[in-house]
Amino acid sequence: MGRPIKDKFFGSSTTPYQNANTGGRTGVGGESISVLTVTSTGTLYSQGTTVSISAPNITGGIPAAISQSIDASGGLTVTVTNVGTGYTTAPTLTVTTASVRTTAGTSTNGSYTLTNVVAVTGLYAGMKVDAPYAMQAGTYISSVSGNSVILTKTQTATTASNSFTFTDVGYGFANTTTLATTAFNAIQIISYVPGGSSAVTNGDIMKQEGSRRYLVQNAQGQGICRLSTGTLVAGQMHIIATDSAGDTYWVTKLTSRKANLYPRSNTGTSIYSTIRVAPWTIGSASGTTTGTAIVSISHTI
């Protein structure tokens, strides 16, 4: 089948994806989070605030995981507990504050405790409390115990049942994320696995079975696929190459140094206008002479 392709081009070398049992990688291309820096913790976030992180760009990647903590001033700190895989752009963090809640309770002048709160679900320490004739300005929840809410300031109303509104007024959190640059580039494929229902992008080559056949995995499963051209059917896959003029080719055979090409798009400037063999790279295409011009194989970083 010609010299086999180095398995560093199949998926990612990021732990835990190195897997000798499969003969190749079992992860996808792309990278992991290298650094997440909180540039501003913000202020006044309640304990009901949540932070989520965006999913990998590549199907099959492992989402990064984070943990969060909120200090006494409502400042929000986020740390990475799993760097994830499959990111081609830095992930984003989304801060969701606790929903506004309105409920009745008993207010007593001079007391720090709001009693007989009808519904405490969704109330968290750090939420601001507002009610006509009952609260001092800038009153927040200190804690919640049973059907009582302990406040940071005393109440100003005589004993009476009132309607209270609780709001998470947190603001100002900001961060930056940086991706690692240590992951190998991975060949990108489009595959229609046996038993699947359609062609799927962003799959992963797990093992080379021949110069035209690969064990692949995508969002619909795993199976042996053969390099092909045109519309894919079950058991077929595409690898796309691009020349320095920007024209593209289906790769019909791939060895460690050469790619058999079949024209896919032709603007009249294609370097390889008929079926040809060309050297390939996962870097930039170069050269304009048929037979020696280097084509670029689509890849993820």
Image (cartoon, grey):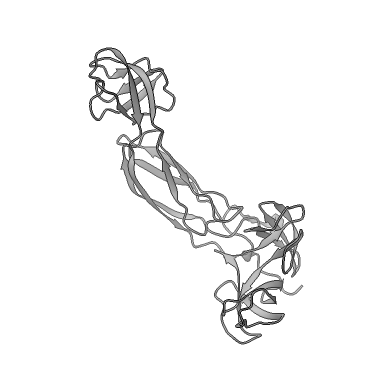
Q: Nearer the viewer, residue 211 or 297?
A: 297
Picture quadrant of residue 122: top left
Check the picture and name the quadrant holding the C terminus. bottom right
Counting from the top left corner in percent of width and height, residue 283 is at 55, 73
Is residue 215 found left or right of 10 in the rendered image?
right
Quadrant of image for the N terminus:
bottom right
Rendered image quadrant of residue 118: top left
129 above or below 299?
above
83 lies above or below 299:
above
The percent position of residue 85, horizontal first and vertical second, equals 55, 54
Q: Name the residue at 37% across, 19% down.
A: 104
Q: How many marks?
A: 0
User: In the rendering, at what x and y percent does residue 267 appear?
Assistant: 61, 79
Answer whether residue 156 is visible to the viewer in this image.
Answer: yes
* Residue drawn at (73%, 53%) of the image: 196
Residue 206, x across and y down, in percent? 68, 59
Relative to 168, is 205 on the left or the right? right
Q: Locate residue 233: give its quadrant.
A: bottom right
Residue 206 in view in this figure: no
Q: Residue at x 38, y 22 (%)?
A: 103
Q: Could you say which is closer to the camera, residue 131 or residue 295? A: 131
Q: Compared to 139, does 188 lie above or below?
A: below
Which residue ends up furthest to the top in the rendered image?
A: 159
Judged from this view, the residue extending furthest toward the bottom is: 289
